[in-house]
Image (cartoon, helix red, strand yellow):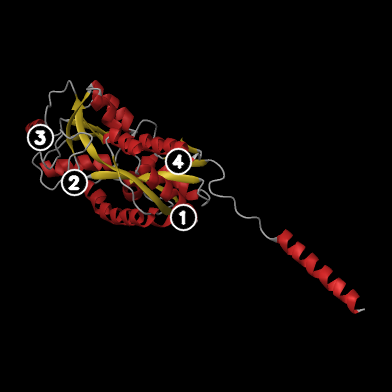
């Protein structure tokens, strides 16, 4: 009898162990287990698009992941951000955000259904870039001083194109007008490329643009750079003076680009993405590729990028309000 009871007990324990093993959840697949979509909130050809595709391509090459850029343009980049906010927080939908759509857009567009400081998770900073003030190589304006003198002589007659009303590029132009004490006529376009084409054709007198958007035409000699808006000269255009050097001390406006994910994305996924993007930014070929576009690579931790977003979000509210730019 005792031997029988022991046999039943052993059998029960064995069955219990087998059942427990069968019910145990399967281990999670290593991230990423499928393609990653990088939402690009602006049209093809602009600075955000160029950097997004560069990051997606290089990540795919260096990690054997599949990262696909997907343009979702409109409303100053806020449509693409909105799509990222609504995506599942799994790490398979990320977005290239920047100052325009994360810091300025929320103060321009009323009733946006998201808050960048609450509804997104900072992943990795990619680069920063000055704004460039440029003109066609056939233009009569050779220096920024020429523009200022002409604008003071005939206020409101000099036109400048930007990627859109209320973008950081437009606001850089507005801040320059205030600093120089001049009045220019702003012509907003739907993206950087249309503004660039009209500047080359002479349909607008000046182009105010992100440097990556204009770099190709500057290198080809079709676009004459007059000044950059950052505190120091761009390493990509070391011979081009800053606005501050051109007589407007303390002038400093630049934009930044960073990768974000929906709020609630697991910290392990954020950490994996941050580590791989930062590793990519440290490579000589990636640095050269970013600098060739007129931008400066700069790695950050997710916490550092999150702090940058919150600081600029608060700071630019007043700048947007002072500019009078509003989109209902």
Q: What residue is shown at x 15% (from left), y 46% (from top)?
A: 251
Q: Measure the alpha-carbon separation of dots 4 and 2.
A: 29 Å
Point out residue 74 in the picture as x, y percentages from the top left corner.
Answer: 40, 38
Evaluate if marks 1 and 2 touch, with contact meaning CB atoms under 8 Å apart.
no
- Which residue was labeled with disc 1? 263
Q: Quadrant of residue 248?
A: top left
Q: What residue is shown at x 22% (from left), y 46% (from top)?
A: 323
Point out residue 42 in the picture as x, y percentages from the top left corner.
Answer: 39, 37
Q: Nearer the viewer, residue 327 or 134?
A: 134
Q: What residue is shown at x 53% (from left), y 40% (from top)?
A: 35
Q: Measure the alpha-carbon separation of dots 1 and 3.
A: 45 Å
Mark closest to the chain's N terminus, 1 or 2: 2
Evaluate if marks 4 and 2 touch, with contact meaning CB atoms under 8 Å apart.
no
Q: Name the disc covering residue 148, or none.
A: 3
Evaluate if marks 4 and 3 touch, with contact meaning CB atoms under 8 Å apart.
no
Secondary structure under tag 4 reads strand
- Neighbour class for label 1 at 10 Å: few (<14), some, many (≥20)? many
- Which residue was labeled with disc 4? 39
Q: Quadrant of residue 98?
A: top left
Q: Measure the alpha-carbon separation of dots 1 and 2.
A: 31 Å
- Neighbour class for label 4 at 10 Å: few (<14), some, many (≥20)? many
Q: Measure the alpha-carbon separation of dots 4 and 1.
A: 15 Å
**Which image quadrant: the N terminus?**
bottom right
- Which residue was labeled with disc 2? 252
Please indicate, yes or no, whether residue 73 appears anywhere in the rendered image.
Answer: no
Q: Nearer the viewer, residue 58 or 126?
A: 58
């Amino acid at each position: 009898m005792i031997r029988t009871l022991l046999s039943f007990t052993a059998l029960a324990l064995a069955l219990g162990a087998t059942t427990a093993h069968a019910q145990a959840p399967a281990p999670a697949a290593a991230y990423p287990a499928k393609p990653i979509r990088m939402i690009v909130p602006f049209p093809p050809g602009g600075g955000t698009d160029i950097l997004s595709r560069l990051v997606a391509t290089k990540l795919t090459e260096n990690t054997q992941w599949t990262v696909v850029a997907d343009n979702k343009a409109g409303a100053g980049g806020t449509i693409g951000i909105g799509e990222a906010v609504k995506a599942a927080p799994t790490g398979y939908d990320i977005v290239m955000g920047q100052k325009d759509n994360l810091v300025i857009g929320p103060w321009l567009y009323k009733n946006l259904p998201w808050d960048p400081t609450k509804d997104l998770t900072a992943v990795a900073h990619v680069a920063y870039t000055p704004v460039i003030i440029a003109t066609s190589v056939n233009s009569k304006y050779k220096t920024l001083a020429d523009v200022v003198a002409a604008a003071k002589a005939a206020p409101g007659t000099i036109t400048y194109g930007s990627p859109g009303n209320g973008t950081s590029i437009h606001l850089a132009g507005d801040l320059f007008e205030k600093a120089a004490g001049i009045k220019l006529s702003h012509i907003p376009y739907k993206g950087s490329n249309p503004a660039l084409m009209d500047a080359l054709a002479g349909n607008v007198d000046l182009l105010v643009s992100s440097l990556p958007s204009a770099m190709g035409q500057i290198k080809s000699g079709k676009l004459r750079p007059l000044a950059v808006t950052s505190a120091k000269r761009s390493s990509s255009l070391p011979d081009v003076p800053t606005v501050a050097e051109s007589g407007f001390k303390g002038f400093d406006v630049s934009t930044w680009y960073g990768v974000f994910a929906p709020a609630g994305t697991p910290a392990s996924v954020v950490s994996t993405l941050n580590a791989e993007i930062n590793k990519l930014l440290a490579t000589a070929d990636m640095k050269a590729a970013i600098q060739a576009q007129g931008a400066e690579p700069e790695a950050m931790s997710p916490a550092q990028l999150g702090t940058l977003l919150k600081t600029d979000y608060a700071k630019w509210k007043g700048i947007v309000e002072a500019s009078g730019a509003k989109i209902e």
